[in-house]
């Protein structure tokens, strides 16, 4: 699963032959993997001859599971991970609510 398939790479901008800027959106604010992802992106680009690499964090719009590509969903499924469902862009959404039992905390029940 690549970072692009995960949907965290928002854009890649080439500025000349040896300068690249990558826009990276973490899966959530404060994601501890951002530093590792940024370092991996910079390393791979430098290994391919890019001299100057900037990885810029972009927090808006926030990442969503809707950003995972179809290929990313396929790979997650093949690995045994159920990919999140894609939300409809608009319109009605079916909701099923089961019975909820509220217990009176004064009645001594758990």
Image (spheres, rainbow, N blue to C red):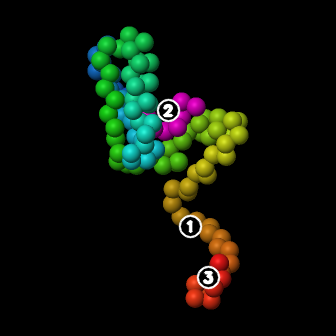
Give the CA distance from mark 2 to mark 1. Answer: 31 Å
> Could you tell me which residue is drawn at 39 percent across and 45 percent down?
30
> Could you tell me which residue is drawn at 69 percent across and 36 percent down?
79
- Outermost residue to the front: 108
Can you identify the residue that label 3 sits on?
Answer: 102
Observer-nearest of 60 and 105: 105
Q: Identify the element where label 2 is drawn.
A: helix
Observer-nearest of 84 and 87: 84
Location of the N terminus by quadrant is top right
Position of 101 with respect to 17 (left or right) is: right
Quick check: is 56 in the magenta stretch?
A: no
Q: Residues within 10 Å of mark 2 (few under 14, many from 20)?
A: some
Question: Tag 3 or tag 2, which sits nearer the N-term?
Answer: 2
| Magenta stretch in the rendered image | 1-11
Which label belongs to residue 3?
2
> Could you tell me which residue is drawn at 64 percent across and 38 percent down?
76
């Amino acid at each position: 699963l690549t970072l692009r398939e995960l949907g965290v790479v928002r854009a890649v901008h080439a500025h000349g032959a040896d300068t690249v800027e990558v826009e990276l959106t973490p899966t959530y604010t404060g994601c501890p993997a951002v530093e590792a992802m940024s370092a991996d992106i910079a390393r791979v680009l430098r290994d391919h001859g890019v001299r100057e690499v900037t990885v810029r964090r972009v927090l808006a719009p926030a990442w969503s599971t809707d950003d995972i590509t179809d290929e990313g969903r396929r790979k997650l499924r093949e690995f045994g991970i159920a990919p999140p469902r894609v939300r409809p862009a608009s319109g009605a959404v079916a909701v099923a609510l089961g019975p909820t039992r509220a217990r009176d905390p004064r009645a001594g029940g758990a």
